[in-house]
Image (cartoon, helix red, strand yellow):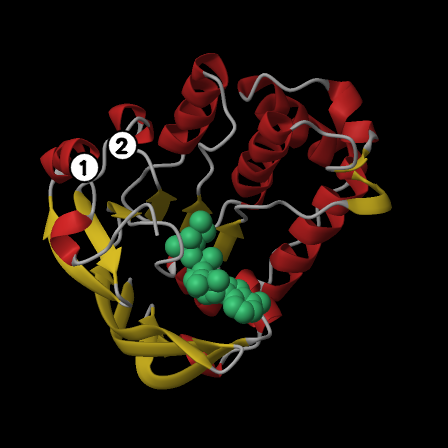
């Protein structure tokens, strides 16, 4: 589904990713862990096509297509979704309006018919309930005044509504208490399936107790330096990232 080869990405002319290789098959859930500042978010942004994340070398193939050649909106329309580490507030646009227009533009790009108001409401009500969110949160402006945990749930709500084929979740666990973490993890697990690839970026292994990954990778010094199964996450929690030449306190 996604094949990243020798990816180099500069941010503000500074090399951050320096030859990253990663392959994620359909139906797989992979986790990326790594110290602060390693470039985990940079990888997510580069895949989503955000401005300012300059790919200087390497390739990314998504469902057989050259992802890096695609505009950010084409990537979204073809099913690539990034749940932000720091979700964006959109004053003046209600959550419902935002979700509806995002969903319908993606459906249009896929050649599917737009949902009418009733169909759409039915869809989001079900997803909202599943994530323990209220209808009131749908009426409010996107993420405006939402707590950290509500913003994270809202990212997962967007993901559940848009039904993307490949999802990147960037530290969706940060700022969540244990109950919210479970709800968000259930929401993500509900999206697991043979057609979907999921990349979970996290700093803590706790999330991986709930979203059990097929593979765990360590990102340090701009590359994937180690790959293992869930036990690698437990090992990292115990030992930190020192063995990869990274001082967490730095
Ligand atoms: P992580 O998500 O692993 O904590 P990031 O991808 O956010 O790491 O950041 C990687 C590095 O890129 C950090 O050293 C960070 O300071 C730097 N960086 C990120 N965004 C910018 C920016 N807009 N300008 C300059 N440096 C940046
Ligand atoms: Mg960070
Ligand atoms: Mg980050």
Residue 124 coordinates in the image, percent (x, y): 66, 30
Q: Residue 153: where, in percent of width, then height?
A: 57, 30
Vertical order, 150 against 114 (above or below): above
Q: Is residue 75 visible?
A: no
Where does label 2 land, which residue?
205
Determine whether the beta carbon of the residue marked 2 sits less than 8 angstroms from the nearest atom of ligand 2: no
In screen coordinates, is 141 left or right of 60? right
Residue nearest the observer in this picture, 120 or 151 = 151
Q: Return the x and y of residue 14 as percentages of the image width and height.
A: 44, 78
In the picture of the structure, the residue carrying the numbered disc 1 is 233
Residue closest to the eye, 130 or 184: 184
In the image, the residue with mark 1 has its CB under 8 Å from the nearest atom of ligand 1: no
Question: Quadrant location of the N terminus?
Answer: bottom left
The answer to whether 110 appears left or right of 226 in the picture is right
Is label 1 in a helix, a strand or a loop?
Answer: helix
For residue 241, side relative to residue 146 (left or right): left
Asked whether residue 148 appears in the rendered view, the answer is yes
Q: CA distance from mark 1 to mark 2?
A: 5 Å
- Pick whichever of labels 1 and 2 is earlier in the sequence: 2
Q: Residue at x 57, y 75 (%)?
A: 52
Residue sitting at 43 percent across and 15 percent down?
178
In the image, taking residue 187 as reference, residue 238 lies left or right, namely left
């Amino acid at each position: 589904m996604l094949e990243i080869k020798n990816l180099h990405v500069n941010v503000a002319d500074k090399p951050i990713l320096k030859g990253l290789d990663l392959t994620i098959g359909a139906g797989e859930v992979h986790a990326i862990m790594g110290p602060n500042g390693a470039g985990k978010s940079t990888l997510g942004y580069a895949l989503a096509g955000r401005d300012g994340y300059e790919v200087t070398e390497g390739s990314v193939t998504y469902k057989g297509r050259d992802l890096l050649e695609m505009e950010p909106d084409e990537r979204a329309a073809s099913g690539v979704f990034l749940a932000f580490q720091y979700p964006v507030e959109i004053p003046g646009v209600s959550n419902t309006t935002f979700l509806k227009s995002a969903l319908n533009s993606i459906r249009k790009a896929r050649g599917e018919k737009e949902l009418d108001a009733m169909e759409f409401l039915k869809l989001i009500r079900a997803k909202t309930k599943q994530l323990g969110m209220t209808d009131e949160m749908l009426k409010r402006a996107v993420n405006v005044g939402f707590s950290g945990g509500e913003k994270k749930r809202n990212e997962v709500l967007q993901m559940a509504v848009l039904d993307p084929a490949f999802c990147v979740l960037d530290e969706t666990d940060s700022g969540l208490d244990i109950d919210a973490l479970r709800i968000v993890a259930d929401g993500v697990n509900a999206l697991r399936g043979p057609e979907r690839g999921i990349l979970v970026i996290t700093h803590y292994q706790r999330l991986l107790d709930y979203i059990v990954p097929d593979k765990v990778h360590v990102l340090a010094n701009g590359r994937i330096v180690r790959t293992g199964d869930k036990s690698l996450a437990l090992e990292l929690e115990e030992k930190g990232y020192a063995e990869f030449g990274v001082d967490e306190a730095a």
